[in-house]
Amino acid sequence: MQAITTHKAPPAIGPYSQAVLKNNTLFVSGQLGLEPTSEILPESFIEQAKRVFANLKAILEAADMSFSQVVKVTIFLADMNDFPQLNELYSQFFSVPYPARETVQAAKLPKDAKIEISLIAMK
């Protein structure tokens, strides 16, 4: 198992890796809307979501991968009312055939974030 890290995404806020690569499969830990050098979350859902996707992209690139190799996405929302905005942004990063996905509302996310996304990609 190889840890994948990049300074273009925020460091882990606990005892885990940004991502790990094993047998050509990349497991990316949940990403929040944190800036790589700061723990300040933007106020709006869409700004947090854009930052999450930027963080995911940076981690994928650190593993020499892209969104086209993602096979599974897990999304946690603080408010399911943000689901339509999420889908609009999501469609800018993924295309047919879309990865498998679930989206759930969480009672509370780390740092009081509005969104957290983890994913699995395969080389």
Image (cartoon, rainbow, N blue to C red):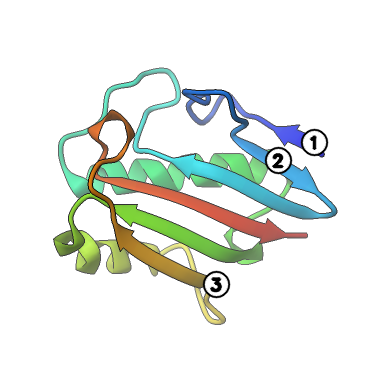
How crowded pointer 2 is (Cα within 10 Å; few <14, some 14-19, many 20+) is rated as: some
Q: CA distance from mark 2 to mark 3?
A: 19 Å
Give the percent coordinates (x, y) of residue 5.
65, 30
- Asked if the residue at tag 1 contacts the one at tag 2, i.e. Cβ–Cβ closer than 8 Å, the answer is yes
Label 2: state its secondary structure.
strand
Q: Residue at x 36, y 18 (%)?
A: 38
Q: Earlier in the sequence, mark 2 or mark 1?
A: 1
Give the percent coordinates (x, y) of residue 97.
56, 81
- Which quarter of the figure is the N terminus placed in? top right
Q: Nearer the viewer, residue 13 or 93?
A: 13
How crowded pointer 3 is (Cα within 10 Å; few <14, some 14-19, many 20+) is rated as: some
- The amino acid type of the residue labelled 3 equals Pro
Q: Residue at x 33, y 33 (%)?
A: 110
The residue pinned by badge 1 equals 2
Q: CA distance from mark 2 to mark 1?
A: 5 Å
Answer left or right for 117 relative to 65. left
- Which quarter of the figure is the C terminus placed in? bottom right
Q: Which of the labelled discs sits on residue 99, or is there none?
A: 3
Across the whole image, how many numbered discs are drawn on residues?
Answer: 3
Q: Earlier in the sequence, mark 2 or mark 3?
A: 2
Label 3: state its secondary structure.
loop
Q: Earlier in the sequence, mark 3 or mark 1?
A: 1
16 is higher (above) or lower (below) than 21: above
- The amino acid type of the residue labelled 1 equals Gln
